Amino acid sequence: MVIGHRSDIPEEDIRQIHGLPTTSVTRTWTDIALSGPLVEALIFTDQVIRAGRTEFGEPSEPWATKHELTEALRRRGSAPGVRTARQALSLSRKGSDSPQETRLRLLMHQAGLPEPDVNAWLIDDAGIAVVQPDLSIPQYRVAIQYDSWEHHRDPGQMLKDIHRAELTEAIGWIEVRITREHLRDGGRRAIEKICRALRFRGWPG
């Protein structure tokens, strides 16, 4: 027996997929952003607003824009968790390719470090795009790469990483490599490592 239930979800937040009703991306985002911790809300927000990399066959359009998410959150009124969701929206940035990049960026924000660019190309003196680190701080020429476990198991990727670091240093930047080990214990080691590079470049923090 099928029992019907009334839903208080507005029709504008409902989509039909293969004939079945489901919540829209924006509604799903609010459900998650309102119910979890800031880091999880921010990770999901970054992924929702991320435009795919067409060179990897991903769709170029994001699932939703920040404006659409803002409107979806407005429709939820004063629901519990709204402050966390608003903070996630404020801290979200386009271009983040992985949850760990987002997690690291949040740790940097909470530690009071300069805000990094996300997956921005580094340009040499001739105006040529050379490398595209995960995070970068142009005013101090510090590039930050998050290396996953898979990187360490792939000899070919290791050679690419060495070449990338050489290119980064050749144009006057410092590369800081962060692994999941650096993110343990609240990311203390990751922040310390980034701070050392920034101070070496004159950051007064």
Image (tube, rainbow, N blue to C red):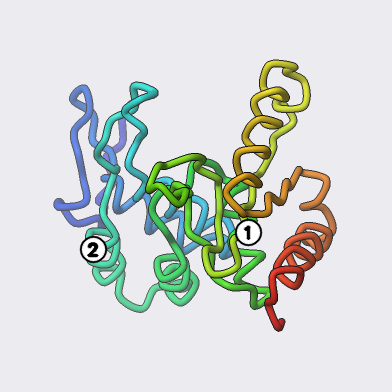
Q: Nearer the viewer, residue 46 or 203?
A: 203
Q: Position of residue 132 (x, y in %)?
A: 50, 42
Q: Nearer the viewer, residue 190 or 23?
A: 190
Q: Which mark is residue 67?
A: 2
Q: Position of residue 154 (x, y in %)?
A: 72, 18
Q: Nearer the viewer, mark 1 or mark 2?
A: 1
Question: Is 77 above or below relative to 56?
Answer: below
The residue under label 1 is which amino acid type? Val
The answer to whether 126 appears left or right of 179 in the picture is left
Quarter-of-image position of residue 82: bottom left
Tally of marks: 2
Q: Nearer the viewer, residue 64 or 4?
A: 64
- Tell me the residue at 23%/29% (across/down): 20
Q: Position of residue 80 (x, y in %)?
A: 46, 73
Q: How far separated are the C-alphas under marks 1 and 2? A: 31 Å
Q: Which quarter of the figure is the C terminus placed in?
A: bottom right
Q: Which mark is residue 48?
A: none
The residue under label 2 is which amino acid type? His
Quickly name the residue at label 1: 142
Q: Which quarter of the figure is the N terminus placed in?
A: top left
Question: Is 161 above or below relative to 36?
Answer: above
For the view shown, which residue lies furthest in the bottom direction?
204
Q: Position of residue 11 (x, y in %)?
A: 15, 51
